Image (spheres, rainbow, N blue to C red):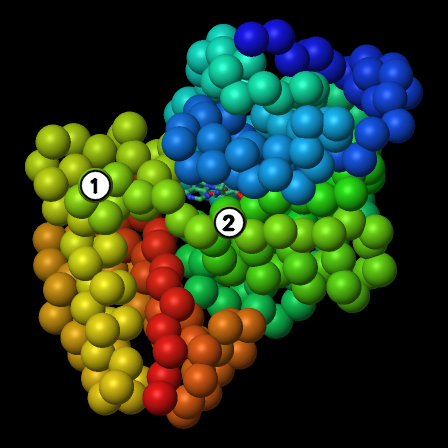
Amino acid sequence: MTEPIVARTRDELAEALSRGEQESAVVLTMGALHAGHRALIHAARDLVGTGGAVLVTIFVNPLQFGPGEDFERYPRPFGADLAVCAEEGVDLVFAPATEELYPLGDPQVTVAPGPLGAELEGAVRPGHFAGVLTVVAKLLNLTVPSYAVFGEKDYQQLVLVGRMVADLDLPYEIVGVPTVREADGLALSSRNRYLSADERAAAPVLGRALEAGAAAAAGGPDAVLAAARAELTGVELDYLELRGADLEPAPATGPARLLVAARAGTTRLIDNIAVDLP
Ligand SMILES: Nc1ncnc2c1ncn2[C@@H]1O[C@H](COP(=O)(O)OP(=O)(O)OP(=O)(O)O)[C@@H](O)[C@H]1O
Ligand SMILES: CC(C)(CO)[C@@H](O)C(=O)[O-]
Ligand code: BAL
């Protein structure tokens, strides 16, 4: 097992990137790495092969956290994260300090996420996706990969990153990876560690609700939502919505996406599933 190169500054990153011309794939994270991130790293390696370079960024981005959210509390187990990267054969880790990524302080020019950025997660977390897209654009322009790998667990983020790349002609291929789940259906998330025993016992209702909704697709959109809603007990619901695969309003037929966000105690969980409307 070889240790990844660790770059903490732009100069260290540029020097590391200058050493090779291989094709690269990047996985952008906020650390606290789990099996979901490992799946993204595996996908990145599959894209570039053993001759290519897999990069992981670890940066808890203050721009995407709102007031009263968990920026300070967010887990930062950097040593453990480096061990995961070494186990998974990551070639380069870029882990800048906030002032390294934002040397001029809060950016005056940011990426506007458009109307979708104010819906679903954006309605509950105003400004979140402007923060996400701004840091994603910066990290991609610093790491200049061929591919950038994202998880379907944050489906709206995946859609918005893809739209940013398309709208701004950014030269990166965005690749999505299916959500990795616990045995009981709970989507892996760095925030799951916040859950008390009782909250953890309640949390799988999100996955169960999504499965029930998808299974009711033959009955159409109303049946999907009714079946999902019936499972959502023991949590505080933020939203349950059926949209098109591109998160536009749900079509009457064809590929759709069922999305849920809820709180188990003070821990906010999100999840989603593909639904095929007949
Ligand atoms: N269970 C999962 N399955 C697939 N991809 C995942 C999963 N969890 C996170 N990812 C992806 O990993 C990347 C980094 O996400 P992040 O570092 O925020 O981890 P996280 O588990 O989503 O943490 P958070 O608790 O903040 O949601 C994102 O593209 C995200 O969608
Ligand atoms: C993409 C990302 C790393 C940007 O901070 C974050 O939103 C995340 O981890 O999903
Ligand atoms: N992957 C989620 C990032 C956030 O909640 O800010």
Q: Which of the 4 image quarters holds residue 243?
A: bottom left
Return the mark for residue 197.
Answer: none
Q: CA distance from mark 2 to mark 1?
A: 18 Å
User: What x and y, as percent, mark residue 59?
Assistant: 60, 27
Locate the C terminus and report the quarter of the image it occupies: bottom left
Q: Residue furthest bottom?
A: 252
Q: Disc 2 marks which amino acid? A: Val
Mark 2 Cβ and ligand 1 under 8 Å apart: yes
Disc 1: which residue: 183
State the SS at label 2. strand
Disc 2: which residue: 177
Classify residue 224 as left or right of residue 6. Answer: left
Q: Residue at x 75, y 27 (%)?
A: 51
- Can you say whether 78 is above or below 228 in the image? above
How would you rate the neighbour count of disc 1 (Cα within 10 Å): few for under 14, some for 14-19, many for 20 or more? few
State the SS at label 1. loop
